[in-house]
Amino acid sequence: MNNSNLFTNNNLLEIPQKIFKKLIKFIADLRLAIILLLLLAIFSISGTVIEQGESLAFYQANYPEKPALFGFLTGNFIHFVGLDHVYSTGWFLALMLLFGSSLITCTFTRQFPALKAAQNWNFYEKSRKFEKLAFSMELEKGSLNSLIPLLEKKGYKIFQENDSLYARKGIIGKIGPIIVHTGMIVILLGAIWGLFTGFKAQEMVESGKTFQVKNIFEAGIFADSHIPKDWQVKVNRFWIDYTPDGVIDQFYSDLSVVDLEGKELDRKTIFVNEPLRYDGVTLYQTSWGISSVKVQLNNSPIFKLPMALLPTENGAKIWGTFIPTKPDLSEGVSLITRDLQGTLFIYNKDGNLISAVRQGMTTEVNGIQLRIDELLGSTGLQIKADPGVPIVYTGFALLMLGVMMSYVSHSQIWALQEGDRFYFGGKTNRAQVVFEQELMAIIEEI
């Protein structure tokens, strides 16, 4: 009875073991790794093509229900699946974790055993074993003593036992795939760490103002420790360079990183594709706007009025403000402009154009002298921190190193002295023609 119970318990223990072994075999399958890699590539491309981080209304307007793009890609579908924030969705993270698990499992179940087998040396003590090699020859003359110096000259590591010889070179080629897998795993870990600890923010700041990073629209669950709290940024100046045709050539922001007491810690003029980096945070120049205008009525003090971005049918950017010409605000004019070059258009209450004026000029409206003192721009900055970037770069370095190592051929040679006969042969995992030419040259020298 006791033996029967023991047998039953052993069977019960074997079931989870079999399931675990099957699960490991499934995860380590190369086909699964390829499928996961393709899925990650496809969804990464979709995150590049489809605008990220926009509102539901934006996607509904740009991806309408009828006609649906490709028959299914609508604004509601994008929002529901999470294609509006691909890289931070749970399913994308799950794909990365599963792909990483597949690489780790494959490394330990396939690559390390293959490396260990390549490091072991074995001798052919029977001549019939040479028949299984891709390249082998039976010579009427030859000896191990004459072969060894030739192999050493070619860079082979030699092992000898009695009348048998085994030689190999290029073991680094077997280490290459392990380094490749390690690099890919490090890249995945860096990407995941960046998702958990990074953040993105967008700020629109008037020239001359100082700000702290607060307008955060995307952040990982551990991002708080990387959001700057002990320093802030001052926009010393913002300006735009125009071509002779009046088209924007480039826009610039002169930025200073200052501590909470106003002491300058770093300074740089940034423009598109030339950001400011400080303390793991990167500030990019992304957009611009017109924030306000300074005006004077007759001999009044100069006062500043905010400029608002006005909606247009063709999507053109136009800023405007209302300037009262009576103390009770019952009468005034509208001031409109489209850039920082200085030309402003003045419209009366009926919407008729009555004048055009530039910075520093004065014009008469409603019986008073209106002077445009200064037009102030604002810089649009995207602020980003991704602590996973150094890890990702390290992974790419390992990946490239592993790929180069993998191109090294792992070559093996066997030789056997059996009476007056000399058997010689070898195999390699790549560059077969070059390897055979090398063996033929050795045979000729023997």
Image (cartoon, grey):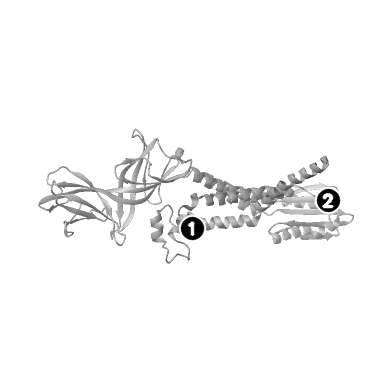
Q: Is residue 319 left or right of residue 33?
A: left
Residues 199 and 361: in front is 199
**Could you say whether the residue bearing mark 1 is in a helix, strand or loop?**
helix
Q: Is residue 63 left or right of residue 206?
A: right
**Res. 429 in view:** yes
> Mark 1 to mark 2: distance in Å?
59 Å
Location of residue 91 in the rendering, given as x and y in whole percent from the top left corner:
53, 51
Query: In the image, what residue occupies the spot 12% across and 44% down?
Result: 299
Location of residue 437 in the rendering, given as x and y in whole percent from the top left corner:
72, 60
Residue 229, compared with residue 443, is above or below; it is: above
Few, some or many residues within 10 Å of mark 1 (<14, 14–19, 20+) = some
Location of residue 352 in the rendering, given as x and y in whole percent from the top left corner:
17, 60
Task: Residue type at mark 2: give it.
Answer: Ser
Per the rendering, the mark at residue 164 is: 2
**Res. 171 in view:** no
Location of residue 330 in the rendering, given as x and y in whole percent from the top left corner:
14, 50
**Could you say whether the residue bearing mark 2 is in a helix, strand or loop?**
strand
Few, some or many residues within 10 Å of mark 2 (<14, 14–19, 20+) = some
Q: Quadrant of the N terminus?
A: top right
Q: Is residue 367 left or right of residue 42?
A: left
Query: In the image, what residue occupies the spot 38% across and 37% down?
Result: 231
Query: In the image, what residue occupies the spot 61% across and 47% down?
Result: 182
- In the orientation shown, which residue stands out farthest toward the top? 261
Query: In the image, what residue occupies the spot 76% across and 56% down?
Result: 426
Task: Kindly report which numbered mark, 1 or 2, lies closer to the viewer in this rendering.
Answer: 1
Q: Is residue 222 left or right of residue 311?
A: right
The residue wearing badge 1 is 46
Task: Residue type at mark 1: give it.
Answer: Ser
Tell me the quarter of the picture where residue 311 sits: bottom left
Q: Quadrant of the C terminus?
A: bottom right
Residues 247 and 344: in front is 344
Residues 374 and 310: in front is 310
